[in-house]
Image: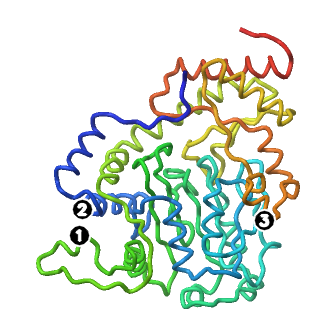
Amino acid sequence: MIPFSPPRIDDKIVSEVADALRSGWITTGPKTKLFEKKIAKYCNVENVLAVNSWTTGAELLLYWFGIKEGDEVIVPVYTYCASANIVRHRGAKVIMVDVNSDFGIDISKVEKYISERTKAIIPVDVGGLPIDFDGLKEIVNKRRVIDKFNPQTENQKKLGRIMILSDAAHSFGAKYKGLNVGSEVDFTVFSFHAVKNLTTAEGGAICINLPTPFDNKEIYKELNTLSLHGQNKDALAKYQKGNWEYDVIDAGFKCNMTDILSSIGLVEFARYETETLPKRKKIFDIYYEGLKNCDWVELPVSKDTNRESSYHLFLLKIKDVSLEERNSIIQEIFKLDVSVNVHYKPLPLLSYYKKLGYEINDYPKAKSIWEREISLPVYFDLSNEQIERVISAVKRAYYKIKKNETII
């Protein structure tokens, strides 16, 4: 069976984790701080906070910004539930916006959803392709949009506009206008979950990129404190001689990354540009070549004038199929010992959001994409022979279900 997305675990990973265990630093320590610095340089920002997941890191930012009950946060309808769940955790209302054919939020529709209650927008780089950051920033900086903004906290007053928090869970290493993603908006949050391009088993990182008058180094300190229950000293600081005493200045969260996780990340980072990204791009290229002559296939966008994907997900769309036919095609692919997936069920199809009154028919593009999408395997150890088997399985499954034909 060809799996969908197993992590790359080898002797280098095992050795670095063992080094962390032997060092005695198994919580946040020197490896985590080094990991933060490497990500910051890579992403063209000065300050990065490593956290234990995208979800906790992003919710921490909503808390820091003062988002609460009565506020609204704009989220694309086509995303994993975490993008919206964190808004609900803060008691705010999720305002869903339809997407483009490339899975990114439809910028042209955003402004009409902005109200006096809008405090933040969370765009999502689905599959690893960056959204149109310049287009989104142009909207939040329009005078009529700024005039509508109703700040309630000091940080909101200081920013003076809607905050943009980029959900870059898929797009570490993606490029926007030639630069690695991370410095485009106020905050960019990555995920390093087990299936991501760069993994720390579980984990994430916050790129801090607030405009003046914010001091991003001070914001890093604030967020670091909030990530440790509001405790003003982390374990590394308290380890210094005579430095045991601490204070708790806020009822914060518990979402720091540990050195065990960071040790995995350091190995992954060291080979990311030289091994991981080139391999993933090669897999995409073989898929493109093997499927380009199939007129029933809609291939994903991985590169255009301003954007280049991180090649995280190969989001294939089948033309002119019903939801039932797409599901049957998936089952046929599995029968051929190939694992595939679907990214994602739009939020209104999930029971929780359905009960809140969201309706999938209000988002026709998302509905159409969802009913036709199949994600193909992409991972480091996927061989050329296995890629060809995947391509063959997709073709055989399509022709069997849609054309009632058997091909070899």
Q: Are marks 2 and 1 in contact (CB under 8 Å)?
A: yes
Residue 285 falls in image quadrant: top right
Instruction: Between residue 292 and residue 65, name the one nearer to us.
Output: 65
The residue to which callout 2 is attached is 30
**Tally of marks:** 3
At 83% from the left and 54% from the top, the residue drawn is: 360
**Label disc, if present, on residue 356 of the rendered structure:** 3
The residue to which callout 1 is attached is 236
User: Which badge, 2 or 3, is on the more N-terminal residue?
Assistant: 2
At label 3, which amino acid type do we have? Leu
Instruction: Between residue 117 and residue 293, name the one nearer to us.
Output: 117
Q: Classify the position of the C terminus by image quarter.
A: top right
Instruction: State how far apart marks 2 and 3 are (Cα).
Output: 44 Å
Q: Residues within 10 Å of mark 3 (few under 14, many from 20)?
A: few
Instruction: Between residue 346 and residue 220, name the one nearer to us.
Output: 346
**For residue 375, above or below residue 44:** above
